[in-house]
Amino acid sequence: MSTAPRPGVVPFTERTPRVAAARALSRRVGRQRAGRFLAEGAQAVREALTWPGEVHELFVTEAFADRDTELRGLAADRGVPVSPVTDRAMAGLSDTVTPQGVVAVCSLVDVPLAEALSGAPRLVAVLVGVADPGNAGTVVRVADAAGADAVVLAGDAVDPHNGKCVRASTGSVFHLPIARAPVDDVLAACRAAGLCLVAADGYAEDELTPATDTGPTAWLFGSEAHGLPDEVKSAADVSLRVPLYGKAESLNLATAATICLYASAWARRASH
Amino acid sequence: MSTAPRPGVVPFTERTPRVAAARALSRRVGRQRAGRFLAEGAQAVREALTWPGEVHELFVTEAFADRDTELRGLAADRGVPVSPVTDRAMAGLSDTVTPQGVVAVCSLVDVPLAEALSGAPRLVAVLVGVADPGNAGTVVRVADAAGADAVVLAGDAVDPHNGKCVRASTGSVFHLPIARAPVDDVLAACRAAGLCLVAADGYAEDELTPATDTGPTAWLFGSEAHGLPDEVKSAADVSLRVPLYGKAESLNLATAATICLYASAWARRASH
């Protein structure tokens, strides 16, 4: 593998300009400025390297390079440079307490709203004002699993390129289109794409059941702390609550989204 | 409210014997020895105080006591003593970085296996070797929401009284019977209770669909890291995988459990 670190090559340190530039990507402003973000860990890096978008560079610790049999091969196939870094440089690039030792510098994954909703989508997850990156990433993973056509982050939401979000998505940020836009634009675009706007609302009168079929659907999910804003609930075509059969007072965002998205995925398949 | 801290009452410190004894409950061995555990935060404490089991004492910070309008009333109604503690004492009792300022000392919630499975259960969640307390607590919450009759922790699993587990359950540990037992005993008892043993296995040939109806069901879930042990898969009556419609390689434990438990809850209601 021609891009493998050669014996005797001195690893980059945290002061090497390319490492310092990559480190700036751990902050939102740095990502916006550079149009790049960091995907960390073997799984995310593997998904990045099999993604059609651009991967600019891999940084690996020597310990990771020693045990890796796969990623440097994938990188070589795509002509992505692989640079060894010191453990300390990796710690600066990593968002975790115990870094796995591999990070990819990627172009941002998000696409314009119109592109995310092109091609007659059947199932879309819209997160309105969801600020927690772990929750957002988990929903991206579930949306991917349920075969959703896109995830849209509406309003003042988390950056999907946030390290915790990328990690919680376990690579799913590379699997389906993700867009970010103001709430009104998102609702209008979903409607224009022929999607039924369905608000997931724990206080809704109507219950989601396996018999529910809303056709091509944009599910609207609010933040765990505040739920959906009233104006979004009013704008929705339908409001549905996930039934609670026991004594639990509520579901967390990821759980509710899981039930809603799979119910839609199943309804669509049942109606064929 | 007679049990409210009176002005001039000196709050307990971390060296007060009752506080020191409660602090020992943050460790598994301390909980086993005392037969008690700590439920932290307003939501968990509220659920504890409306639970039929025994609550021995509440510790509150002065800041919490000043703004609390509900919990001391509930405690007074049940004759549960409420003791003010210093912020430092609370920090020692708390499992979180920013304690809410209220902790309840409760008797352990778990019951014998036979008791958990009594009364012709229809839906039971069995966690085999699940070590992560956050995952376990989230599944307890989902099982509660789906109307499960019990949660059973089989084999070398997390203590359901672990602070992170209690918190992730958002009080659901107080809502449905929880039992702990060796794997073989759990499988035998589920069978004896007339439950179909259904292994949730990402590699199973058969797919879970809304048409799946396994009757009264014990879902068997493995750990996120290792899945179900082979001997448990072999012992199951049925193995089912949650379908992945997109490019996601897998689902996390809580997501998979959500889909499985709600599918069963819905199948049961559809068959009536």
Image (spheres, coloured by chain):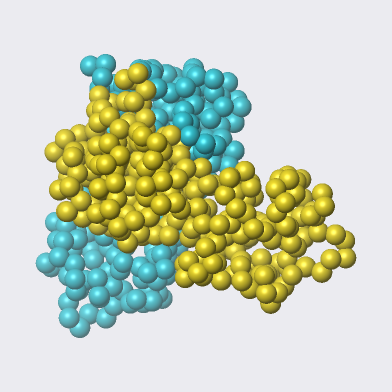
Chain colours: A yellow, B cyan
Where is the C terminus of chain A found, in terms of image quarters? top left
- Can residue B199 be seen by looking at this rendering? yes
Q: What residue occupies the far bottom of the structure in this picture?
A: B8
| Residue situated in front as seen by the camera: A29 or B124 | A29
In the rendered image, residue A260, in percent from the top left (x then y), is placed at: 31, 37
Q: Residue furthest left?
A: B1
Residue visible at 51% across and 57% down? A108
Q: Position of residue A76 (x, y in %)?
A: 75, 49
Q: Nearer the viewer, residue A226 or B38?
A: A226
Q: Is residue A159 above or below residue A69?
A: below
Residue A253 image point, x, y percent: 33, 48
- The residue at the point 27 percent across, 41 percent down is A192
Q: Position of residue B210 (x, y in %)?
A: 35, 22
Q: Is residue A270 above or below residue B138?
A: above
Residue depicted at 64% across the width and 67% down the height: A91
Q: Is residue A247 visible in the rendered structure shown here?
A: no
Left or right of B237 on screen, residue B262: left
Left or right: B3 in relation to A15: left
